[in-house]
Amino acid sequence: MIVLFLTTARFIFKIQDAPKSPSALDVILTGHQFWWEFRYPQLGIVTANELHIPLSTDESARPSYLKLLSVDVNHSFWIPQLGGKTDLIPNHPNSMWMGPNRAGVYLGQCAQFCALQHAMMLLRVSVDSRDDFAAWAMNQQQPDVQDSKVAASRHVDAGMH
């Protein structure tokens, strides 16, 4: 029993203390009442309720490193097919990493009752191939067409006065 305990403890600490890969995608995940915010600081992208991460294979390993924050109450990030639950507690940053090896869409939910609209805190994780992830990121980085039209009309209106 002692040998089993020590072996298990060694592997747990090895996994928890694993250094972050230089190729990792950084994502700041913030739980709000009653939605999820995902910031990709390396890419300049912000999304809501839908996380996109690249497929991580032996040939092209690119794990996703998630920094977990809460701005209001306790939340729990849980995608059953991609890993265990990780709590988000206000003023207590947490982290986890994902390295899924199968592309697809995975569904999850806040697993911590966070108030009456808790059931609305659904989320979707899209694990994309390298090319699909690059195309998604490029699309997200494009200026919003509606914002561009509004800015252009303000510029024209300003020039007419």
Image (spheres, helix red, strand yellow):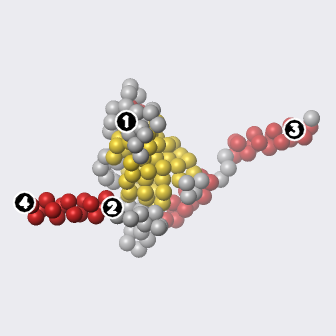
> How far apart are the two marked residues, 1 and 3, measured between alpha carbons?
47 Å
For label 4, the residue is: 1
Q: Residue furthest left?
A: 1
For label 2, the residue is: 17
Q: Amino acid at mark 1?
A: Asn
Q: Residue at x 39, y 68 (%)?
A: 57
Q: Nearer the viewer, mark 3 or mark 2?
A: 2
Q: Amino acid at mark 2?
A: Asp
Q: Amino acid at mark 3?
A: Ala
N-term-proximal mark, 2 vs 1: 2
> How far apart are the two marked residues, 4 and 1, measured between alpha carbons?
36 Å
N-term-proximal mark, 2 vs 4: 4
The quadrant the C terminus occupies is top right
Q: Nearer the viewer, mark 3 or mark 4?
A: 4
Q: Residue 47 appears at what percent x and percent y?
A: 53, 46
C-beta proximity under 8 Å, tags 1 and 3: no
